[in-house]
């Protein structure tokens, strides 16, 4: 074997060794998974106490004027990317529709994101 092949093989073996050492240390810090100790109703009771769902459609002037930028500012990248692609691929023809969609669905999408970030499901 050539020296370069031996060096690459040694680097790969060293990387695997480091990975497995890291993996064993990381797994030792996790708590054991307890299955069947609580019903889903208990998790729901902890998850959404006093949560009131906002109206499905509302109006947000900031989202209307900023459109996809508002979604980026709120950290909702998926909606922002889709709206930017729609506006860009249509050559700006769909901009008014994207503005109205952003204004009307902003509260609902933001509340869904907040709920999803703190939920067990």
Image: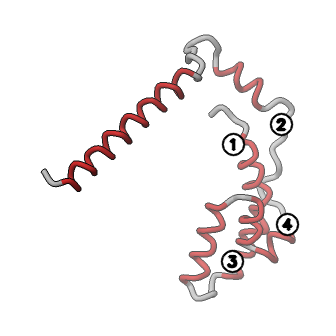
Q: Residue lying farthest front? A: 3
Q: Which residue has dot 4 on it?
A: 60
Extreme residue toward the top, this view: 37
Q: Is residue 90 positioned above or below 12 on the image?
A: below
Alpha carbon separation for disc pair 4 and 2: 21 Å
Secondary structure found at label 2: loop
**What whole-number distance in Å separates the C-alpha atoms at marks 1 and 4?**
21 Å
Mark number displayed over residue 80: none
Q: Which mark is residue 97?
A: 3
Horizontal and vertical percent position of residue 102: 74, 68
N-terminal of the two: label 1 or label 3? 3
**The C terminus: image quadrant:** top right
Crowdedness near tag 1: few (<14), some (14–19) or many (≥20) residues, C-alpha within 10 Å: few
Residue visible at 84% across and 65% down? 59
Mark 3 and mark 4: span between their CA atoms?
14 Å
Residue 56, image quadrant = bottom right
Residue at image mark 2:
51
Q: Residues within 10 Å of mark 4 (few under 14, many from 20)?
A: some
Decide: is 19 above or below 32: below
Select label 1 or label 4 by which is in front. Answer: 1
- Callouts 2 and 3 close, C-beta under 8 Å: no
> Could you give the CA–CA distance between mark 1 and mark 3, rounded to whole angstroms?
26 Å
Answer whether labels 1 and 3 touch (C-beta < 8 Å). Answer: no
């Amino acid at each position: 074997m050539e020296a370069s092949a031996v060096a690459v093989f040694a680097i790969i073996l060293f990387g695997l060794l480091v990975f497995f050492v890291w993996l064993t240390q990381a797994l030792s810090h996790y708590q054991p998974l307890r299955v069947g100790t609580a019903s889903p109703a208990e998790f729901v009771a902890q998850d959404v106490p006093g949560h009131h769902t906002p109206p499905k459609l509302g109006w947000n002037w900031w989202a209307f004027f900023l459109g996809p930028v508002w979604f980026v500012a709120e950290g909702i990248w998926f909606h922002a990317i889709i709206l930017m692609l729609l506006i860009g691929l249509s050559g700006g023809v769909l901009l008014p529709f994207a503005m109205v969609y952003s204004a009307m669905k902003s509260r609902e999408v933001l509340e869904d994101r907040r709920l999803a970030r703190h939920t067990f499901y």
